[in-house]
Every structure is written in structure tokens, then in C-alpha cells.
Image (tube, rainbow, N blue to C red):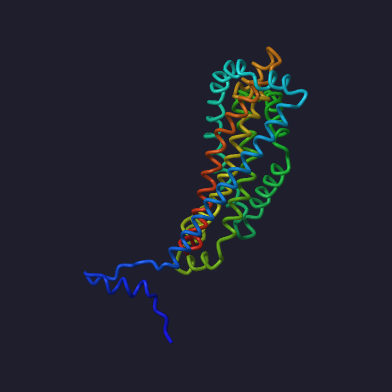
Amino acid sequence: MTYTDTADTDAADTDPAGTDAYVPSQRRIDRERFKRTRARRAASVAALSTLVTGVVLFLVITNSPGWPRTRETFFSAEYARKALPKVLEGLLLNLRLLVVCGAAVLVIGLLLAIARTLRGPVFFPLRALATAYTDFFRGLPLIICLLMVVFGVPALRLQGVTTDPVVLGGSALVLTYSAYVAEVFRAGIESVHPSQRAAARSLGLSSGQALRYVVLPQAIRRVVPPLLNDLVSLQKDTGLVSIAGAVDAVYAAQIIAGKDFNYTPYVVAGLVFVALTIPMTRFTDWVTARMDRRRAQGGTV
């Protein structure tokens, strides 16, 4: 016994042009209607629960005994208007540091990863130095690295060495983040199957050409999401150069807060960094989801 969808049969009989136009069956229409109803119900429940949670948190915070003083100290509209122009002016320094240090970190990190993956005993000293560098700066806290570079380098009184706090602070960021990015690149290089390199060599490519034209394009494509996450972290940590005296968004907020002992400028600076970080985070999520879809469809090697 064979089953024939009556809706499809009726559509074929009543089609005057004789075309095979698709007409969904009643069962499919009911199923799609059920899915839409369930999606609307889930969205309504989520919105209601979010609203209830927000109201509860608002009531708990605003009814706490110290809320009036906290509001005056951390959420003053007057100090927020006063601090915002200075914070935005200092934010330009953070953005410049992000661009310059980000480019340097990517280049140095890639070179360190290549050095760690070189084969042959002749490259052992280079591999050992790259390994020691990554192990040391991954284990050293960033704040300590900043203090050592910002205050230690000028103390040496070397001729021709800058004492600019922006340059020194940026150098400390590059030293630390290069170690992290190098491990990301190395993981991508080692994730490429050895058969890819062997196939390239069998076609007559040298080891360097196989690395450049076959291994690195695949490795870099695979590690784009974690690289973007590292850049998001770098964007936040550019605010640490304020300990060197560089007037960035954080230090500008500190100057204003130190005059009147009101900490609203810190909140303003924090919200500005959050406003920058959220788009980068969403972009990272989009890239990750896009690469996952392509990989599931077989579009990414």
C-alpha cells in the first residue's frame, strides 16, 4: 500500500498550467503554526521573567539603607556630564593603543608561533627562546610587567631609549599579549593535519613554501575567533597604561574623581569601555557562528 498526500494530489489536479507548484500539506501548516505559537510563548515568558527580575533588583537596590549615598557618590548626573568630555578625549589614546599594539601583537605572535613549530635540530635554540618567552610572559601578571617596563626602563638611563609612558605602557602590553597570541597561532598551526604539509611537499614546494601557502592560511582561518577575543581583552587592558601617568580614559576619570571625591567618572569610563567591548564581542560571536556553519557544511578545510 502506498501513501499519497491528498493535498499535493488535489493541487496537481487543479493546477491549470500543469506546473509542479509546491503546496504544503495541512499537517505541515499546522506544524509551522505550532512552532510559531511556541516561539511567541517562549519570547513572552522570557520578557516577563526579565522584567520581573529587573524590577526585583531595582527595588532591592533602591530600598537599601545606603542607596542615597551610593547614588550621590557613584551615579551623579552632574559629575557624569562633567566627566564625559574628558573621558572621551582620553579614550582616543586607548583606541590608538589598541590599533598599534594590536597590529604589533599579531605580527610578533605569529613569528613566535612559527619559531616554536620549526622542525630540525638546527632550530632548537630558536624554539627554546620562543618557548621561554611565551612561558615567562604568560605567567607574569600584566600589572607587574607594566610596572617593570614603565619604571624599570627609565631607571636604566639608557641613551636613545624613550621615557614616554605611552610608548612604555604599550610595549608592556605587546610583550604580554604576544605570548598569548603566539599560543593561539601555534594551536592553529598544529591543528592542520600533517598530510597537508606532506601533500604540499610532494608537489615540489619547499618547507617554507608549504608553511606559507598551505599551513598558515588554514591555521589563521581557524583561530580568528580566539584572536578576536584576545583583541577584546587588549582593548580593555589599554586602560592600565594610566598607572604610568598617560592620560587615557581611566586616568582622566581619576583626575576628575580626585578633585571632589566623587566616583561617578569611574562609572562613566567603565560604561564607555563596555560600549566599545559589546560590539566587538557580538562581532566575535558572529564570526564564530559563521565559521561553525561553514565547517558543518564542509566549506572550511
Residue 166 on image: x %, y %:
60, 26
Q: Position of residue 298 (x, y in %)?
A: 47, 64
Q: Residue 163 at what x, y percent from top left?
A: 63, 23
Total marks drawn? Answer: 0
The N terminus lies in which quarter of the figure? bottom left
Give above or below for 157 relative to 232: above
In this rendering, the answer to whether 243 lies above or below 103 is above
x and y, in percent, of residue 184 in the image: 60, 50
3 vs 85, nearest the viewer: 3
The answer to which of 187 and 262 lies nearer the viewer is 262
Comparing 66 with 99, the one in front is 66
In-image side of 116 versus 16 (left or right) = right
* Left or right of 192 on screen, residue 152: right
Name the residue nearer the viewer: 145 or 129.
145
Give me the residue at 29% from left, 71% from top.
20
- Give residue 243's quadrant in the image: top right
Question: From this viewpoint, which residue is outermost toward the right?
Answer: 65
Q: Is residue 50 above or below residue 120?
A: above
Q: Residue at x 49, y 53 (%)?
A: 290
Residue furthest left as drawn:
17
Most extreme residue toward the bottom is 1
